[in-house]
Amino acid sequence: MARRPPEITVSIPALPRYVHVLRAVVASVAARLDWAFDEIEDLRLMVDEACSRLVGPEGGAATLRLRVLVDDGGLTIEASTDRSVDRWPPEDPGQTLSRQILSTLADEVRFEPVDGRPSVLLRKHRDR
Amino acid sequence: MEAHPTEPLDPEERDLFVRAPEDPAAREALVVRHRPLAEYLARRFQGRGEPVDDLIQVAMIGLLKAIDRFDPDRGVKFATYATATIVGELKRHFRDRGWSVRVPRRLQEMGLQVSRVVGELSQVLGRSPTVREISERTGLTEEEVIEAIDVASAYVPASLDAAPGEDDAPREFGVEEEAFELLEGWTSVAPAIRELPARERRILYLRFFRGLTQTQIAEDLGISQMHVSRLLARTLARLRTAASTAGAFDREGAEG
């Protein structure tokens, strides 16, 4: 009988070169739940896009935290950072683009602070 | 102030450097001006196992450092100074990632195998296969399949980057162009989208405007699903870089 982990949390340094760890975690969780190859690839793109909004420049000491919540209906991914930012959601030119990309890939997208931390919340329904 | 014998900086550029510390617009103008140098240098580091868009991002960081540190009174050409800084940044990037620059042969082979089987199974099943199905077909463990997917999407053999052939000419060029101009968000990267190779632009269009899945796009273009996801990931990374300098693009006018 498949064990369904209700929640997985991983923390990495909030730097671009560690994001691949989070991509791999999400891919691994989805694969174990028998998600299709192209859904997994979409999840990886989502993680990339969301994390690109949260990571900081090289040399920063902040942490990026990813929580994956599994339920029968799909996956909820919450990425957040303790990096201090002026404004959340950000208002740079990349923001509308990010939102557009994420809303194509995910079923729900929210840029909201969680516990006062800048975060991106994504929900992807199970297709099959 | 007397002219330097070799006149390393034209007055306009000099003025930009003088203003740059206080004036973001001047700094951005310098970024736009010298961006081709950063891209050129990034491409010289291609084929070492890092996606070229990552390299361009690293080179852009080097360029920003060079702009911030350059002293226009030193009598050195900015290009000379910036080249050293950018190459230094690129080398450091490779050094920092030393553990991942070289992909073990075993992983490369697994990547190719998984890529082939995904194509075969998609044909047979009429849908995208699951990792378990790929695992059963290849005899690899599920972990290995996941690892192979990860590796394959980051490390693309140079041959796959070959210039697209005649067949890749866009069939709905006008439609795609219009679509990107219409949607909020994408307008900021319209110049970058125009610069994309036809095939990348089409993949972007099919995924984000027509809502096709990666499997359907692979069929449409006659390339592997893994190649589609690789190109998509790379294209999005490229657009992110473009968006981060979009303010500069706006000021420079529509031409990218």
Image (tube, coloured by chain):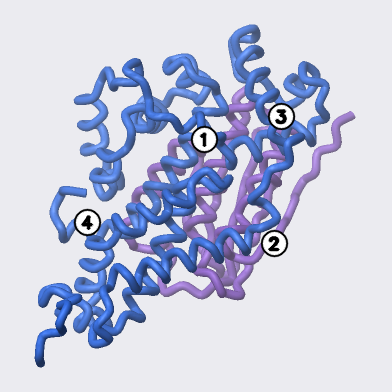
Q: Which chain is blue?
A: B
Q: Measuring from the top left, give residue B39's x and y in whole percent.
A: 36, 53
Quadrant for residue B235, please give it: top left
Judging from the image, mark 3 belongs to the subunit labelled B
Quadrant holding the C terminus of chain A: top right
The three-letter code of the residue at mark 2 reads Ser
Q: Residues within 10 Å of mark 4 (few under 14, many from 20)?
A: many
Residue that numbered label 2 is attached to: A11
Judging from the image, mark 4 belongs to the subunit labelled B
Q: Secondary structure at mark 3?
A: helix
Residue shown at 33%/33% (left/top)? B197
Q: Tell me, what hue is chain A? A: purple
Q: Measuring from the top left, give residue B129's x and y in whole percent.
A: 66, 20
Judging from the image, mark 1 belongs to the subunit labelled B
Visible residue check, residue A71? no
Q: Measuring from the top left, give residue B84's x and y in whole percent.
A: 41, 70
**Mark identifier at residue B158:** 1
Residue shown at 19%/76% (left/top)? B8
Farthest-out residue, right = A1
Residue that numbered label 3 is attached to: B109
Q: Secondary structure at mark 4?
A: helix
**Mark identifier at residue B249:** 4
**Mark identifier at residue A87:** none
Labels 1 and 3 within one chain = yes
